[in-house]
Image (spheres, helix red, strand yellow):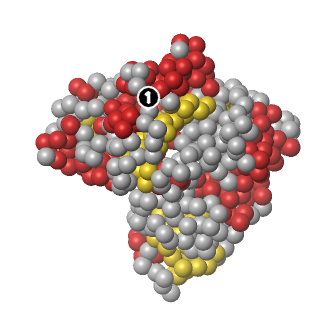
Amino acid sequence: MSVIRCLIPGTAEGPVLASEIGLSFWGGVDPDNGLVIDAHHPLRGQKISGKILMLPTSRGSCSGSGVLLELIHNGHAPAALIFREPEEVLTLGALVSQKVFGAGVPVLRASPEVFARLAKAENAEVTGTHLKFLNEKHPMNAEAAAVAKSPEDLAMQRGAHGPATQLAMEILLHFAAIKGARELIDVRRAHIDGCILANSANLRFAETFRDMKARVRVPTTMNAISVEQDRWRAQGVPIGFGVPANTLAEAYIEMGAQRSFTCAPYLLEDAPQAGEEIGWSESNAVVYANTVLGARTEKHPDYLDLCIALTGRAPLSGVYLKENRTARKVINVCGIDHCDDSFWPMLGYLAGIHAPDAIPLIRGVDQLKPAKDDLKALCAAFGTTSGAPMLHVGGVTPEAASGAPDAPAIDLGPADFESVWDSFNTGSAKVDLVAFGSPHASSSECHALARALDGKRLSREVTGIVTLGRATLAAMRKDGTAATLEAAGVRLHADICWCSITEPVFPPTARVIMTNSGKYAHYAPGLSARAVRFGSLSDCVVALLSGEAPNRPPDWLAPISG
C-alpha cells in the first residue's frame, strides 16, 4: 500500500515550506498575495505562493476553502498542498476550483515517515504518479472509496434536477470518496458560511450556481454577510464594496436561503435538536451544534455547504457516526476553583491547541457551572485553534460520558491560562474600540452588557460595538434593551460580524481593540491590522467607560500572577 495518497490530482514543482502547526487560511493567509498573516503562527510573514506547502492539517475557519479558491484564481496559491492527517477545508477548495472553474492545485496526504523526510527537503516535485524529493521517488495511490448512490442520488447526478444540482452532486460524491464515506445521508437543514465577501471567489462561486438556476432542497440559513443590508449606503460603505457584498448575499437568497445573516444559527428560534442530522458550515456553529445541542454535523467546508443544501445530502462519515464522536484526548483542568467569563474562551483556545485534530474531553470544570453563553465562547475559541468538529465537557455537555478510557491525558493549570492571557493582550492599555459579538451576541449577553453599564455613558474616546443577528436585534428592540444600550453610546450592528466588518463601520482611527471573545482576540490582528486587548465582560465595560483596559490578568489567576 502506498504511503502517499493523491486526493486532488495535478503536477507541481517548487520549494518546500513546512510547519508542524496547522494553519487556518481564513484569517491566517492574505487572499490577495499569499502572505501568512496569522499573528500567532510560526509561518507569519512567509509567502505560501508557489511553495510545496506542508501542514499536519488545517485548523480554524471553514472559510479557508474560499481563500484557497481566490489564491488559485489570482496566481498566489501554493504549488501543492501536502498533509499528514485528514484535512477537508483546503482539499474541498482545491476540488471546487477544479470541478467548477477548471483549475486547481494537487493535494496529497503523506504518511508521517514520508512527511518528516519531505520536511527536510529544499524542493519537491509532484508528477502525475510520483512525489520526488531528496533524490527519492515515491509512488502515489489515487484510489478512493466507492460511494453507494440511492436512486435519487443517481437522478441528481444524471441531471434530472438541473445542472446546478448535478454539479453539486458530483462535488459531493468526489468529496465523499476522499473522506472514505461509503454512502450519503439525508440532512434536515443546512447553513451557508461563504456569504461574506472576504474575496471575489465567494461571489464567483455563488453567481455561478445562481446563474444555473440552483435551488435549495432543505431549509437553509445564512451566515453573517459583509454589509448591513438596510443601512450600508447611509453608513458610507463604498459602492465598489457594498454592491458586490449585497449581490453575494442576494445570490443565496435567490437560491432559496433564508435571510438569517447570523454566525450563530443555534440562537435562532428553530434550533437543531439532539440527534438531528444537519449540514452546517461555520466553525463555531458546528462545534456548538455538536457539543452543546447534541445535533450531528461534520465541519463542512465553505462551498460544500451549498452542495449539501442543493441536494439535501451529505457524506456519511466523521461525527455523523456515533463511534466517531468519542473523545480521543482528555484535558484535566487543575487549580482553578473559581472564574469569570474570560475563563471559558481561554479554555477553548487551550483545548484546541492541545487537541488540534482530535475530540477532547475536558474534565474538572463542571463545578464552575458554565452558562450557555460560556459554552458559546468556549466552542468558538476551540474552533479557532482546532480542526475538530466538537468537544466534550465532563458533567456539562450531553455526550461527555463517551470519552475513550485509554485516551491520552494532559493537565492544564493557571500558568497555561496566564500564557494565553499574555498572548491575547499585546496592545497598549489605551483602548479605542471595544468589540462584542464574535460570534453574534445572544439576547442574554446584550442584557448582561446593559446591566453592567448601569445607565452610564461610554467615554468619548471609545467606540463600543455589538454585532448580532437581526432576529436577536429585533428581540432587543422589543424589550427595550437596544434602546438602553444605544442611550449609553453602544452601536448595534446586525447582519455583519467581526469576521466581516469593514471601514467605515469599523472605526478607521481605532488602533487598539478590546474584546471578550477568544475567537476575535486570535483573528483580529490579522484581519484588522490592529493591536488587541482581551478580558471579561466586566473588563470590557471598564474600557468602555474609561478608555483604559485593566492591565492585569483576571482575579482567578491572581495567586500565580501576584
Q: Using the image, determine if residue 186 lies above or below residue 305.
A: above
Return the residue at label 1: 457
Identity of the residue drawn at 68% across and 48% down:
197
In this orientation, does residue 246 appear? yes
Q: Is residue 391 visible?
A: no
Please rate how many residues cluster around mark 1, counting C-alpha atoms within 10 Å: few if below 14, some from 14 to 19, many from 20: some
Vertical arrangement, residue 440 with respect to residue 52, above or below: above
Question: Residue 342 vs residue 311: left or right?
Answer: left
Q: Amino acid at mark 1?
A: Arg
Displayed quadrant of residue 163: top right
x and y, in percent, of residue 195 in the image: 68, 42
- Residue 242, compared with residue 469, is above or below; it is below
Q: Quadrant of residue 382?
A: top left
Residue 96 position in % (x across, y down): 70, 54
Q: Secondary structure at mark 1?
A: loop
Question: 136 or 517: nearer the eye?
Answer: 517
Where is residue 182 drawn, in percent x and y? 60, 43
Q: Residue furthest bottom?
A: 135
Q: Report the residue that reaches farthest toward the top.
A: 479
Q: Residue at x 42, y 41 (%)?
A: 515
- Residue 559's image quarter? top left
* Image location of residue 10, percent across then percent down: 68, 69
Q: Residue at x 70, y 28 (%)?
A: 259
